[in-house]
Every structure is written in structure tokens, then in C-alpha cells.
Image (cartoon, coloured by chain):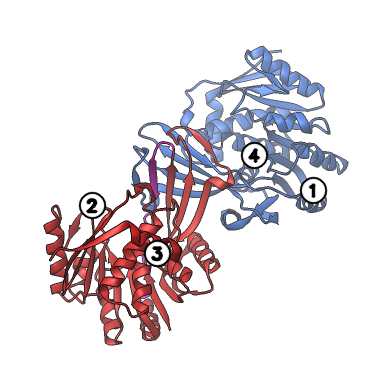
Chain colours: A blue, B red
Amino acid sequence: MSVLTVCLNPALDREFYINDFSIDKLHRLTPEMSEMTPGGKAVNVAVDLSYYGINSVVMGFIGGYVGNVVLSELRKKSELITTNFVHIEAETRENIAIIDEKNHALTEINSSGPWVPLEDLQHFIKRYELIAANAEVIVISGSVPLGIPNSVYGELTKIAQKLGKKVFWEARDPIIMESTKISVPYILKPDMRNKKVLLGKELVSQKDYIEAGKELVSMGVKMAVISYEIEYDIIVTSDGVWIISPTVEVEHSHLLGTGDTYMAAMVYKFLKGESLLEMAKFGYAAALAKTKYKAKETPPFKDIEEAFEHFKIERVE
Amino acid sequence: MSVLTVCLNPALDREFYINDFSIDKLHRLTPEMSEMTPGGKAVNVAVDLSYYGINSVVMGFIGGYVGNVVLSELRKKSELITTNFVHIEAETRENIAIIDEKNHALTEINSSGPWVPLEDLQHFIKRYELIAANAEVIVISGSVPLGIPNSVYGELTKIAQKLGKKVFWEARDPIIMESTKISVPYILKPDMRNKKVLLGKELVSQKDYIEAGKELVSMGVKMAVISYEIEYDIIVTSDGVWIISPTVEVEHSHLLGTGDTYMAAMVYKFLKGESLLEMAKFGYAAALAKTKYKAKETPPFKDIEEAFEHFKIERVE
């Protein structure tokens, strides 16, 4: 038994560390100035889970030269990760990040990613049904490629629920809006890095965040984990509302991948049979522990335990 | 019989067309905003030659994911190109060019390229001896990877000369300096895009360029083709000195690949049995014709013929 992580739109994450990166110049790199890692939110979750000794099957669409690199690099990461991608014609996306630590600048060039035809989606769904039946829990996170409707999270969750499986989501609001019309997940962590919007409403005050979380819970979500002003989290369940806040300063330039570590850590505690609130606390601690590292790295348990000393959780309602 | 083009350090050339490219921003690309082509000077020569109906064998060192892309894309280019690379452990280099046509800015990120161990060079030389024996003419152009001495052009040319073959070079001065200690080519086109230095001397006046060309000819080079103030060329043979100048304005942002087209066009005329000066004129015309195109493209014969109307050649000495 293992975790099924669904990464519909995986990516090759490429980081270039160039101090004084500037326009209209030629920059020569030495090998240690660049990194290439398999990416996409659910791929990152699978990698984190493998560090914690948990098997996963990663599903999604992959294609082209870039897709082959993602696949080979992902397989190298851990024997605990099994890949089961539908191979498509188009090229998998590549996300280039040019990190200038000297000037604290992050310049990004993200490719559009592939267009996935309907027949490939149908093929994917058939395979998904088979694999979901054997999964202990399902994580669906990250963007949806062109050609696939935003309601796909809802469709996949409906299938999972018929099989008696619990589903975790991390997604942007357009996906949440379309997919919750079909079914709702067990745990929902909205991805609001780009826009502070949830269920179509702009969130400004803490009250707005709490109300949006309550609305999700009233729709059937068991726990909403909502990031608030970057370093806080608002946790809403049918039992109440909590706010988690750090007691130390958080390094904002090290936030890359924290959301995925949060998700993986919650899944880890879910598999141990822990309560919703314990899952959220452990997820937060793991995300906080991750900010010690610049790159996308999984924090070891020791760091997570230490991180428990650096935040507080308060019941708000 | 065909041309042997030696590209010791091939590359994957990647062009991103991003208007208003700026630091600390996220730029999203649509598919038509990026291009990926096999590169490295002698690879470009082979591609140009294939457009002119000439077979070539491309040799050099290739490795890793990037190497595989270069190889597949090169094979797609033309059936007239045969590849015979020594496969190495390290990753082939990638040259990223971010072209902002709106602001006339070219931002480049070039990776270091692989380190090639000595045993791979020995393996290469064995294969080179076999293939060179069947080649009609040999072109060696472009950079030398880490681990390979700059004298390699000289060593390869010495082998070619024993086989009775003529060799064309396009290279930077450190390679010319080290390699001419061993042997000199038939045609030498110094690559002075970075530094106006030839045989260790800085070139300033037109006279400096002519003297350097004469020195090369005195060393045994049959013709030196030296770029002067970007759009002029100084041609030196044992018969005299000529200067070629355009009679139209040259678009400087379209110079990418012109040197390689120049080389391919000279090789084309060499194979037709034309004189040195005819080779140089045709090379110049082809390079000028190429500047009609933004990307690395081979100009058709029609454009080259037209280009003959747009430059003049004068005997200086």
C-alpha cells in the first residue's frame, strides 16, 4: 500500500545561481551554479514522502525531451517512488529560476507546458481507477495542463471516494471553484501564492480567511489549511478555528517548496492515524523546518522536532 | 566522399524571445517564444552544408541529457548529416540566449560544458584517423572542452596533412597560438568576436590586421580571412591583400551564425574547385545574405547571388 500522488503538469525545475545577474550581458556558468530537479507540486510531495520512508506512485502526463529528464531524475531520487505517467506528444514544461542571492532577486522564465488531448485524459482516468483502488491515500496538487478542464480534481476525487479513499488537494482557486462543484477533498490547502482569492472572493482581513475556511468545511472539506500573510496558517475544521504563528523570523527567500513539504508531512501523520490538528501542526513544523534551506530540500525529522519550539497555535473560535 | 566537420564542444542553443525581459520578474512563455537548435560552430557548418546538398560527418564529444537532445535534433535536420560523436559521461553545454527585440538586448547564460578525460580524447583520435582518411576536406571550428589541450587543432591537422587532406579552422586566439606550433591549416578564419587579438597581439589599426594576416600566411596558411570592425573582412594570401566591405547597412542584431555560414560557403566553393579569392567572396556574400534573418538560418543561393550586389572587394597590396 502506498500514497498515490497526482501531478498532472510536472516540470523540470532549473535553478541558476548568478550573482549580479543583468540584462544584455553574457553570464558564464560553472557546474556548481546550476541545478536541475524534477518538479511540479505532487512530484515534490512524492520526493518528500520518500525521505520519510513512504512509498508513492506518481501519476500525470509527461512528454518530450524535458519529460524524459524529469522521469530519469525522479527515478534516481528514491526506490520508494514509482512513476506511472501517461506519455504525451508535447514537451513537458520547464521552469527556469535565476537566483541572484547578492541582490535578492528571483527572475523566472516558465514555459507554457503541454496541451493534453482528451483521449490522453481518458487513458489517464482508466489507469487512475486501477491505481487509486490500491492506494492508502491520494494527493492531487499543482496546476492543470492546457486541454484538461479545471474540474478534473473533482472528477478524480469522485472516483476516489467511490473506492473509499481520502483525498488531499493543493490547488489554485480556479481549480477549487470548478472541482468543488463535483466533489470536495478530505484536506484542502489552497495555493494562494499568486492571488489572495478563495472561492472567487478576495481575502483581506483575517476574518475573510476564516469565513472562506468555514465555507469550505460547510461544503464537506474535513480540514482547510489556509496560508495567511505568508507565515501564518489558519486551520478550520468542524470543531473550530485555529491560527498558527511563528515565534521566530521566517526567511522569505527560502520558501520554495514549503507548501509541498507541509502537504507531505500532513500525509505522513495521516498514515500514522493522527488527528486533523496533529496533522496540521506537524505540517506547519515541517514547512518551518524547510525554510532553513535555500533549495527544495526535505527537512529531516530532527529539524521538524526542533521547529515545534518555534511556533504557537491558538484557538480562535 | 564528404566533409568531416569537427565540433569538439557542441552545444544546445536555446533562444527565448521575451520582450521587456526584466530582473526579479516571472516571465511566462508561449510555445512560439522559444527555440532549441543543435549548435557549436562546426555543427552549424554541417547544417549549412546540408542545405547546399553536401554530405558531412560531424565528430566531437557529446554527453548527458543535453547531448541526447543535440544528437536527436541534429539527426532530424538532414539525412546528409552523419554523426560520429564520442559519448562522454559529462553533460554537453547549453547556451541560453534571451532576446528582447523591443529593447535590443541580448542576455546570455552559457554553461561551462563538460570536462573530457584523456582516454576519451585518445578514443576520438583513433576514430578521427579512420574518418579523415575518407573525407574530401576537414573543418575544425569552435571551442575546445575542458580537459583537452588547445593544441588539439594542430594535432588533428597534422594527422589530416599526412593523409593529404586540407583543413579549415575557425577558432579563438589561444587555440590558434597553441595549435600553429604543431601545424597550420589551409584556411584560417580567426574567431575574434570576444577579443581583437591575433597571435597574441592586440589589433587596432587596419595595418595591424593586415600584418597579422601576413604573419599567418608566412607560417604556411594559404588564406587568412580576418573579420575587421564587424562588417569588413581582410583577406590575405601569398598573392596579396584584399578588403571586402559592404555597400549596404548590416543589421548587427542578426549576426548570430554568420561566421559559420561564411565557412560553409567557402567549403562549398572549395569542393567546386574554385580559387581562394572566389571562396572568400562567396563566403562573404553568404554571410551578408544570412543577416537578413534573425535566427540561425542558412541563406538560399538566390539570396547569396543578390548579396553579390551589396559589397565590394578592393586590392590593398
Q: Is residue A98 left or right of residue B287?
A: right
Q: Does the magenta run of residues contain B262?
A: no
Whether residue B232 is situated above or below residue A304 in the rendered picture:
below
Query: In the rendered image, which residue does mark 4 sit on?
Result: A264
SS for callout 4: helix
Amino acid type, mark 4: Ala
Amino acid type, mark 2: Glu
Indicate the position of residue A26 as horizontal and vertical percent values. Answer: 34, 46
Crowdedness of circle 4 by 10 Å Cα count: few (<14), some, many (20+)?
A: many
Q: Quadrant of residue A316?
A: top right
Query: In the rendered image, which residue does mark 2 sit on?
Result: B229
* Subunit under mark 1: A
Q: Nearer the viewer, mark 4 or mark 2?
A: 2
Q: Are marks 2 and 1 on the same chain?
A: no
Q: Are marks 3 and 4 on the same chain?
A: no
Query: In the rendered image, which residue does mark 3 sit on?
Result: B305
Q: Quadrant of residue A212?
A: top right
Amino acid type, mark 1: Ala
Query: In the rendered image, which residue does mark 1 sit on?
Result: A132
Indicate the position of residue B182 as horizontal and vertical percent values. Answer: 20, 76
Q: Nearer the viewer, mark 2 or mark 1?
A: 2
As measured in the structure, the alpha-carbon distance from the residue carrying label 1 to the one carrying label 4 is 18 Å
* Subunit under mark 3: B
- What is the quadrant of the C terminus of chain B in the image? bottom left
As measured in the structure, the alpha-carbon distance from the residue carrying label 2 to the one carrying label 1 is 66 Å
Whether residue B202 is situated above or below residue B283 in the rendered picture:
above
